[in-house]
Amino acid sequence: MLVQRNSIRTSLLVVILLACLSVIQGCQSKSKNSSKNTIQTALSTSSGLDSLYTPMPLSYARGYSVRQYKNIHLVNISDPQRKKATIFRLAIVPRSLKDTKSLIPQGYKVIYTPVRRLITMTSLQLSTLIKLKATERVVGVTSTRHLFNQKIKAQLASGTTQHIGIEGQFDKERIMLLQPDIILISPFKRGGYDSMKDIGVPLVPYLGYKEMSPLAQAEWLKFVGLLINKETQADSIFKGMEQEYLSLLHLTKHVKNRPEVFSGEMRGGHWYAVGGKSFLAQLFEDAGAEYFMHDNPKSGGILLDFETIYSRAAHVPYWRIVNSYQGNYDYDALLASNARYADFDAYKNHGVIYCNMNKKPYYEQMPMEPCVLLKDMIKVFHPELLPNYTPVYYSLLK
């Protein structure tokens, strides 16, 4: 009898254990199916795909953002000076990846990397390739008027890089023969880019020129690094720039005397200035000075008449000028261009801060050298802070 009872108990325990195992397996199966269904749902909808991508932080640039999933980068590009702006969407995809269409949300133009052959439309764009030591990838350029880089000059001489024409008059046949992977463009400038859409080469917007601070402009180096598979190098270079720039800001943070400065010249009956929220205004502030239109809310250019400028800047001690002048530019040359300049205190007291683009690689190098640019300005406004520094681009006119 005792043996029979033990047998019954053993049978009941076996039944209970089998039931528990069945429940556990069912839960695991449901969990696996649920996880699988979640991934399938993400891959079946654009919004779901977006959720797979993780934002990559940018510290200063406002004209583009980056998100990453595996080795794919989604880049959204828009005008940082406008709240409601056109958004250009790029999916930067390694050539080695296969069957990636199911991982890219709708509306993204695919750019395969590394980009091996590209065309630059501006010196600002070219400056990033020079900084990353990747000039051999540049197969086409526009204006060579202010070109200083010896490697690009040698490439032009050998024909490995070619001149593709000027804005509005691009040589489309030559562009096609160069077989570029991409063409970097400035979409909001009048450059005749619409005529290039039928060439079949991806037009990639570069809006570094729209950024409103030196570090923000320089951070576009990371974008180009993504395109040419030099992301790590670009990040390292930018980190060094940032550290030095912030150390220079520490020098000027507590200066008590912040002199005022204005900018520009008369051109065609108008004086072109920029607003108080501009790149230039930020540079002056960082250098321990104050832009004469610091209270202006605009970030872009402003056309003013001479009387307006004179009323605001007649007694401002510093005046920034950048132009292209054949020969040695001095105060006599400045006065020869407009006799009314003699009425400004900055002219009378030799407070003109000058850069000659015929002699300095200004647009070709300056965008990727924010620390050099800042030191030039600090040397003018607060020379005691950098007693042994020799200016590179800007210095007081002699």
Image (cartoon, rainbow, N blue to C red):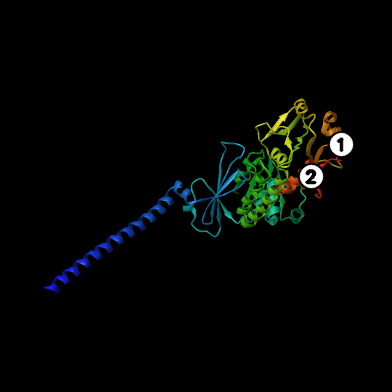
Is label 1 in a helix, a strand or a loop? helix
Counting other residues with Cα less than 10 Å from the Cα at mark 2, is it few (<14), some (14-19), or many (20 or more)? Answer: many
- Choose between 222 and 312: the one closer to the eye: 312
* In the image, farthest residue toward the bottom: 3
Residue at screen point 86% across, 32% down = 348
Q: In which quarter of the image is the N terminus?
A: bottom left
> Does any portion of residue 177 appear in the rendered image?
no
Q: Which of marks 2 and 1 is nearer the N terminus?
A: 1
Position of 302 compared to 87: left or right?
Answer: right
> What's the amino acid at mark 1?
Tyr
Position of 1 compared to 344: left or right?
Answer: left
**What's the mark number on residue 379?**
2
> What's the amino acid at mark 2?
Lys
Distance, label 2 to label 1, CA atoms, is 20 Å
Counting other residues with Cα less than 10 Å from the Cα at mark 1, is it few (<14), some (14-19), or many (20 or more)? Answer: some
* In the image, farthest residue toward the right: 332
Q: In which quarter of the image is the C terminus?
A: top right
Residue at screen point 70% across, 37% down = 281
Q: Where is residue 290 in the image (x, y as percent from the top left)?
A: 73, 36
Is label 2 in a helix, a strand or a loop? helix
- Choose between 342 and 250: the one closer to the eye: 250
**What's the mark number on residue 331?**
1
Q: Where is residue 241 in the image (x, y as percent from the top left)?
A: 68, 51
